[in-house]
Amino acid sequence: MKFTIKHELKGRIRVHMAQNRMSYEEADTLLYYLKNLPGVTDARVYERTADAVIFFSGKRDAVIDSLKKYRFENIRVPEGVIEHSGRKLNAVYKEKLIRKIFMRFGGRLFLPYPVRAAVITVKASGYIFRGLRSLRGGKLKVEALDAAAIGVSLLRRDFGTAASVMFLLGIGEILEEWTHRKSVGDLARSMSLNVSRVWLKKEEEEESFREVLVPASDICPGDEIVVHMGNIIPFDGVVTAGEGMVNQSSMTGEPLPVRRAKDGYVYAGTVLEEGELTVAVRATSGSTRYEKIAAMIEESEKLKSGMESRAEHLADRLVPYTLAGTGLVWLFTRNFTKALSVLMVDFSCALKLAMPVSVLSAIREANAHHITVKGGKYLEAVADAEIIVFDKTGTLTEAKPSVKDIVVFCGEEKDELLRIAACLEEHFPHPVAGAVVAAAKQKKLDHEEMHSKVDYIVAHGISSFVGGRKIIIGSYHFVFEDEGCCIGDGYSRAFEQLPDEYSHLYMAIDGKLAAVICIEDPVRPEAREALRALRAAGIRKIVMMTGDSERAAASVAAELGVDEYYSEVLPEDKAAYIEKQKAQGKTVIMVGDGINDSPALSAADAGIAVSDGAEIAREIADITVSEDNLRGLVTLKRLSSRLMHRIRCNYRTIVGINTALIGLGVGGAVRPAASALLHNTSTLLISLKSMQNLLDEK
């Protein structure tokens, strides 16, 4: 593609494409291409000027060569990226703002007074109608106050004041709607489906079937896929076999999972909490899911924090007092101008505009830091949190544990035991399972699907049959206590000498211990620093809860310096601990990444899923931190605390400014037009400040 270099600095280059301007689709396609180039850290594309700014850490020549190879028609962009990028939305609202400002000041310059008066009267009728509709519903709300201020100005033939009030209200409405829709779009996009590979059911000879892991892009309507417990359902479809409990909260808002069996319909993006399903794919499009999520967010109260909701209720409750104050001023002074000056000022307008803008802007800013927040109330919970509970494996420890050794307790070869373990483990999303699969792949231990149906018992292990033999893989508690397996003759000493520095995964065949897979799961390098930063940010107690052994848990707890730790706990134990703390009036947040963390994530005031953990954890969690380190939690805590500080500051500022304006109006120091202008200007300025990034403030 032809382009010219307009400006260049170290690690940054601005180029102009050889065209006057780009369409929204062309700009989004180029942005997608640039952001996925090796060495490119960030990129921006401006469709109006056909410019692109590229930030890179790699070699300059590599970026230039990639730009030369770029062809719009050759780039395949994933479905939903262009349709829901938000670029068109931003352009539409920018044009609305420009048109609003031009009509306001252009009308005063070019339209004669009688025409302006007529236009203002027509526009005012809309606000007056909304006010009357509010009164007809039996509620004295902000709309009635706006209608009264505009209506009284028209009766006094003060068209300038009426126009100023409507202009500033209109600007506020555009900014609020823009911020709201953009935040909802960003949130829905983050919650939308992102599945790379799925299990395809393939028919073999003699009516037998096997599962094959294939890219999601290869799936067509009519194909049958297998969804295992804890995994996301990647496509809309009809259940053809199996039975399970499906969590549909992201689609329908239902808090409890629903049962799905043969002939039941399942939706893309919902999560299979229990069981196993075979699904005949009906549709592979992801756009429907995006639209459903966006609609659910729009209709729910999720976006509102408690402080925001209280501000809105307070705003409506203040309307009668403003009207009463206006009446009292007129009654005691008999001065209509002073009374109108009070009417032009109301606390509710600023409260109802500035608070939602603050919350939605914070959600947008979190998204820019790769943190998906599903509602303002969860930011408030993080800000108020006293206790933070961590899972260990994959959360405080690295998300990529590795197999260091396999201790054999039978006559089988190490590689054969690893092959069997990997065959079973690859169906389930857990860091330890991933380590086993990776170890087998590294040794090139390929396998066919050798097993029968695999049963996964949450927080315990896996049970299946291979070649007529029962295979058990899991924790010590599961293998020896639940399943009653034993150690073969002559192996007791070897069992006692298992290395203490590793976590252990036990594997039994036909009731006897066959192998212990030693897993190295080092602590995240940034974990200690992140925990220290969380304490400094206001967290009083840090708790670690894990299903791992006492020995492994004690080692990690000592290294990180947590306040409390609990080992060999079950999922329900984590949830019970959180419920107990909440019952004592404490705000608790939970951080985890596995299937076994889902009950605790649901129980917490704010459940946080980190890294690329199990789909069910990300789906159930109220907040998802996409960065593969714990520093994102510190960013989240800082952002949440600053949001609450901003809301409190906004509240105090609004009360102070409006009280002063009312006093000036009663004293005759400002006229109604000036009172309205100062009130609405202050509201607009507070709202604009509320849209600024919280983390940029000092």
Image (tube, grey):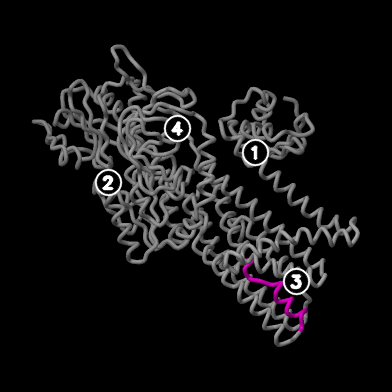
Check disc 2 and give the amino acid type. Gly
In the rendered image, residue 342 lying in the magenta stretch gets the answer: yes
Residues at marks 4 and 1, CA–CA distance in whole angstroms: 34 Å
Rendered location of residue 486, percent (x, y): 12, 35
Residues at marks 3 and 4, CA–CA distance in whole angstroms: 56 Å
Residues at marks 2 and 1, CA–CA distance in whole angstroms: 43 Å
Q: Which residue is mark 4?
A: 236
Q: Nearer the viewer, mark 3 or mark 4?
A: 3
Rendered location of residue 440, percent (x, y): 33, 25
Q: Nearer the viewer, mark 3 or mark 2?
A: 3
Q: Nearer the viewer, mark 4 or mark 1?
A: 4
> Relative to 542, is 322 on the left or the right?
right
Q: Which residue is mark 1?
A: 43
Q: Residues within 10 Å of mark 3 (few under 14, many from 20)?
A: some
Earlier-in-chain disc, 4 versus 1: 1
Check disc 1 and give the amino acid type. Ala
Residue 152, numbered circle: 3
Q: Nearer the viewer, residue 600 or 439?
A: 600
On the rendered image, what quadrant is the C terminus found in? bottom right
Q: Nearer the viewer, residue 419 or 277?
A: 277
Q: Is residue 551 above or below residue 516?
A: below
> Where does the magenta region start and end?
335-350
At mark 4, the secondary structure is: strand
